[in-house]
Image (cartoon, rainbow, N blue to C red):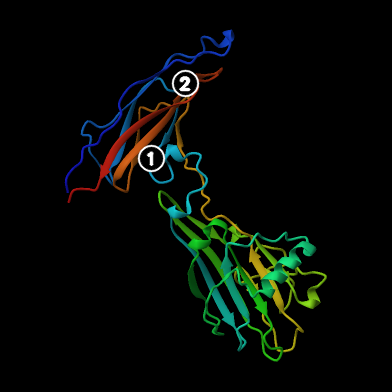
Amino acid sequence: MNTKRITYLAATLALATAAASCEHEEIYEPLEFSVRLAPTNTYRTGDPVVFNFSGNADFITVWTGDTGHEYKHRNRTKVDIADIESCELEIEISQQYGTLNNLDLFAGNKFAGLNGSDAATDRPVVEAIAANDCADWTKLEFTPNNANKFKTYTYDITRFADRFSWGMHLFYPDPKTTMRTYRINPKITVKFKGHDTQVYNYPDMEFVPFSLASQHADNPYIHNVSGNGNLKFQGRPGANNTANIVFQGFSAGAFPEIDQWAFMQPVALNTISPDTGLNIKGVTDDLPSYSYTYTEPGTYTVTFIVAGGNYQGQSAPAPYEVTFTVIDPIE
């Protein structure tokens, strides 16, 4: 492999802070700060890059320039859908008892969500979804069985990432048959270009149940009720779940009707946390240098936010950038 030399900005930053009033005129000395890199100017993955400091900065924050730590992305909270490398819903499901499948799973991005406490508002929404047989949703296929073993199914949901929701519908296909028990553990994994992978586990998902069964007309949000035939959500009062979501099956003829729906409230999966920096020096710290190890080759821009201060306050922070290239080790 050819060795590339690094290039970096190495100019002394001099700042003079003007006071806002006559009482603060002499608070700050002019701020001086510079960074000196190793004289070899060559950096490789796995080896620490050492930044040697000079000057009188009292406060230093570093943005290391790698994924999740770029100063230019400090205020970024959303990426373009095109910058999603992959977006997957993973559902681990166990099925027990019963001979007929009575569960549909579905996903989409046209659902606006449910109120969760106003049945008069939510009922027409759920009834419309039922009436058009989930036409605005995509059915998530899985293999029905009664083996009582967890099996994992993975679904590509990238096309729904702007406002993703998924749900389930439990129904009664035949009152003469035993209804199956389902145990479900969901997870969403989103991989981005230029940002850390984001994972949504069950606690990050908000579900609203709604029953259209006539026996639940006065309490359509029924859930986590003890006994068979009920939908339970882990982490809510009354749950003693062996999985995140459990529908407890029941013997033939035990219930007159089952028409249970549950929806995950929509979420934008292209939403991200802003990139972050690290405070490495305060006014009482002595920090002649700082080192950081890069694991991926590439050209990085490291930004130091520096300021001076004393017991009366702090000067306005100012950025100082250093750009260099990291290469793979030579074999």
**Residue 46 image point, x, y percent:** 29, 46
Residue at 50% from the left image edge and 22% from the top image edge: 316
Which quarter of the picture shows residue 40? Answer: top left
Mark nearer the N terminus (1 vs 2): 1
Helix, strand or loop under label 2 = loop
Q: Amino acid at mark 2?
A: Gly
Q: Amino acid at mark 1?
A: Gly
Residue at 42% from the left image edge and 40% from the top image edge: 70
**Residue 220 image point, x, y percent:** 77, 69
**Residue 236 image point, x, y percent:** 69, 63
The image shows a total of numbered marks equal to 2
Residue sitting nearer the eye, 226 or 3 = 3
Contact, mark 1 vs mark 2 (Cβ under 8 Å):
no
According to the image, label 2 marks what residue? 308
- Horizontal arrangement in the rendering, residue 292 relative to residue 269 (left or right): left
Name, please, the residue furthest toward the bottom.
Answer: 176
Q: Residues within 10 Å of mark 2 (few under 14, many from 20)?
A: many
Residue 248 visible to an observer of this rendering: no
Residue at 55% from the left image edge and 18% from the top image edge: 311
Residue sitting nearer the eye, 77 or 247 = 77
Residue at 47% from the left image edge and 28% from the top image edge: 282
- Horizontal arrangement in the rendering, residue 104 relative to residue 78 (left or right): right
According to the image, label 1 marks what residue? 65
